[in-house]
Every structure is written in structure tokens, then in C-alpha cells.
Image (cartoon, rainbow, N blue to C red):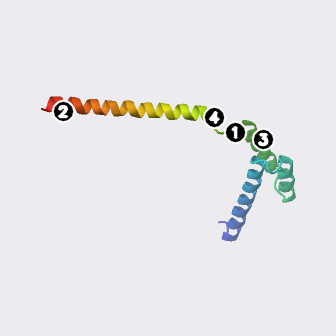
């Protein structure tokens, strides 16, 4: 069984690599810089190559977060408002019908 010290070191290593990967994904570091740091830390070449492939795939398929145009936001709000009014109208109609048939 692995010692607690070894597990803590592995966990710290994973966190460090995760931060480095995140820095590439957010654009503050290049893949080449990440690769150089991993190679300097005696990471296995196979691991470095696989990680590079995964990051490149992520960057290629990344979805940009962009604000929705104000026109679309307003249209959605308007449609929600109309939907609420229709729902209220239906509730009122149901209440009226219930009153008519319960008297």
C-alpha cells in the first residue's frame, strides 16, 4: 500500500499539473511552455505527449463564452412575459369555470 507521504506528493503533483493545464486553456501559457515545464520536472515523455494531445483537442473544440445580444435577451424576456400572462389567463378562466359549476 502507498504511504501517506507518497500519496500527498502525488496529489500535489496532480494539482500542479492541473494548474499548468488550466493556464494553457485560459491562454496565459502556451502548450510549448507547458511541455518544457513538464519535461524539466522529469515527467514521462508519453504522459507529456498524451497531455499535449488532449489540450490541443480541447483548444480546438473549445466553445467560446460570449454574451447574448441584447435584442435576443429582450425577445426572450418578452416571450416569457407573454407566457406568464397566458398562464394567468388560463388560471383565471379555470377559476371562473369552477365558480360557475359549483354554484
User: In this rendering, which labeled residue sits more in front, label 1 or label 4?
Assistant: 4
Q: Mark 4 falls on what kind of element? A: loop
Tell me which numbered mark, 4 or 2, is placed earlier along the sequence: 4
Residue depth check, mark 2 versus mark 3: number of the one nearer the observer? 2
Spatial CA distance of label 3 from label 1 is: 15 Å
In the depicted structure, whether residue 56 falls above or below residue 92: below
Callouts 2 and 3 close, C-beta under 8 Å: no
Crowding around mark 4 (Cα neighbors within 10 Å: few <14, some 14 to 19, many 20+) is few
Q: Secondary structure at mark 3?
A: helix
- Residue underneath mark 1: 64
Point 82% across, 56% down: residue:
43
Query: Earlier along the polypeptide chain: callout 1 or callout 2?
Result: 1
Q: Which residue is mark 2?
A: 99
Real-space CA distance between mark 4 and mark 3, rounded to the nearest whole angstrom: 30 Å
Measuring 75% from the left and 47% from the top, which residue is drawn there? 25
User: In this rendering, is residue 101 above or below 65?
Assistant: above
Amino acid at each position: 500500500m502507498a504511504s501517506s507521504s507518497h500519496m500527498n506528493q502525488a496529489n500535489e503533483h496532480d494539482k500542479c499539473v492541473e494548474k499548468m493545464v488550466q493556464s494553457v486553456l485560459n491562454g496565459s501559457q502556451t502548450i510549448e511552455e507547458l511541455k518544457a515545464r513538464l519535461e524539466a520536472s522529469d515527467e514521462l515523455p508519453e504522459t507529456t505527449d498524451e497531455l499535449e494531445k488532449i489540450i490541443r483537442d480541447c483548444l480546438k473544440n473549445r466553445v467560446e463564452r460570449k454574451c447574448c445580444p441584447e435584442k435576443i435577451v429582450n425577445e426572450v424576456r418578452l416571450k416569457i412575459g407573454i407566457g406568464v400572462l397566458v398562464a394567468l389567463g388560463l388560471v383565471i378562466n379555470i377559476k371562473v369555470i369552477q365558480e360557475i359549476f359549483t354554484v
